[in-house]
Image (tube, helix red, strand yellow):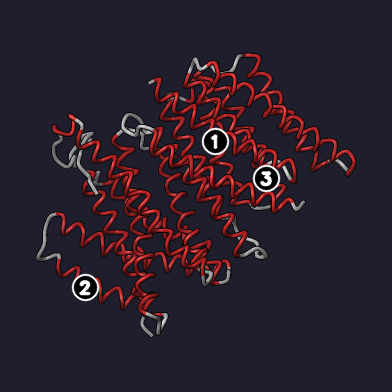
Amino acid sequence: MDLSLVQILMCVFGCAELAVLIGLCVRGLSFRRSMAPVFFTFALVSLLVSALYWLAYDLLRPEIRMPFAANEFGEIGGFLLLASTLNAVFRGRFAAARREIFCTAVFAAACTALWIGWSGEWVEDVLVGLSFGYLLCVCVRSLKQSGALSRTEWRLLGGLAALLLGLQGLTFLLPEPWRNCADYGAYLVMFAVLGYGIVKLLLALRRGRDAAAQFALAVAFCTWTLSTMYMSAGVFYLAAQLCYTCSIPLMLIALRREEAAT
Amino acid sequence: MIYAENILLCIAAPLLLSLLFVRGQAKHYVLAFAAGMVACLLAAYVTGFLRLLIAWEETDVRIFLSPVVEELVKLLPLLILLLLAEPGDDTLLLLAVALGTGFATFENCCSLLGSGEISLSFVLIRGLAVGVMHIVSVAALSLGIIAARRLQALSLPALVGAFSLSVVFHGLYNLLVSVPGVPSYVGFCLPVLAAAGIYHPLRRLYARENQSPSRQQATGDGASGTPPPTTDFRL
């Protein structure tokens, strides 16, 4: 089956899901006490418009390559507004998790370098990298502040992120058969973290103790799915996209609980 | 050939003269309207310069470059105003709407004069779509600023995020209207749908806010010092 067709169908499904979730946000969330629901709704709108742009471009001008991916402005907006949502829930300071944030910034910079290496689009990748890096940093600070991850989990996450970057870097250096090994190793690491993330998030949502920690975990899971999407191709990209589609309603559930708890 | 600068002079001269006879909010509105027209001309200059610099085709410029430049040029006066004058909620919304209206009016005038003979229905559709497009994007941005300022959550990431949203929305509109037929009509409907999407929940929100007890104690425009949390800015 043609993968591009599957990708278009998934994008259509994603748009429909986002439209429904925006409706639920507007109807269900209270916009009076905090800016978090406002930012979250606008983040969803931004992601929806970005997806619609990609879809419209693909249908109207399929054979013409974009001089720069204008839909990425929507993604940048989505990342920054999602980070602002987290900032509205956790009014903490970055100094509270200095070491973790430093490692996250290094991870984001390395990811950006890898994207540039793959696509060669400097300006776009730097802009997306900056906003994505900011979201990652806010996410890590929120995870740290809420105590959502244990000490062992932080160490494991750091180790796996370093391993992932190492394996992705090796794909540029190694010759053909070894390159594939490094590539599949990277996929294994990314999807292992995704699998662990979804289990941890679902368990946290089921136990329902700390609503703020649940929201931080949900955003962290969504961020990791995005990171996996940007580092994947073919079937792996579609699998990561499916996880990303699932992560958005989970974020809304967590935000609703957080709102009810405050 | 009619130059854009000449159109600007023709429209702006009576508006600026009218400043001698009005005062208060009307004066603010006229000034912001004229600023919107100047912003539109500035956007055309910048886009033209960049087009020469990067040598893109006109369609690509319209789809990819114009939204970024136009939204940036509309945002800058608002930001300058916010930083220098700290206007109250009412004033900020009024100025934003006037800015968007001026921008759309000037763009429509230049477009109509440049495109020769076109049907009345197309003029109406284009006029409404572009008008709503520019007003909605800048008004939504100003409402976002007002709401974020009230809850002390106004930050650079939030502002840049909102700006990116307006850019991609504008880009989607330009992409759709660049293809004749059904896509262009979908494109023309898009700003109206967005306006309805913003207008309805906001009205509901403000209606609810006006019913709350704290609303009864609201005072003034909030231009001096910190804006009061319950200033009236009904649509």
- Which element carries disc 2, helix, strand or loop? helix
Q: Where is residue A231 in the image (x, y as percent from the top left)?
A: 70, 41
Q: What is the number of the mark on residue A115?
A: 3
Query: Counting other residues with Cα less than 10 Å from the Cα at mark 2, is it few (<14), some (14-19), or many (20 or more)?
Result: few
Residue A149, how many percent across, how many down? Answer: 59, 18
Give the residue displayed 35% in from the left and 30% down from the top.
A34
Q: Tell me which corner region of the image, top left, top right, bottom left or bottom right, holds residue A241.
A: top right
Badge 1, how many Cα within 10 Å: few under 14, some, many 20+? many
Question: Is residue B224 found left or right of A21 in the rendered image?
Answer: left
Q: Is mark 1 on a helix, strand or loop?
A: helix
Place residue A192 in its image quadrant.
top right
User: Label 2: chain?
Assistant: B
Which label is found at residue A248? 1
How far is mark 3 from mark 2, CA to CA? 51 Å
The subunit carrying tag 1 is: A
Task: Tell me the CA gap for discs 1 and 3.
Answer: 24 Å
**Residue B52 visible within the image:** no
Image quadrant containing the C terminus of chain A: top left
In the picture, the disc for residue A57 is none
Q: In this view, does B161 lie to the left or right of A144?
A: left
Local secondary structure at mark 3: helix
Q: Nearer the viewer, residue A138 or A227?
A: A227
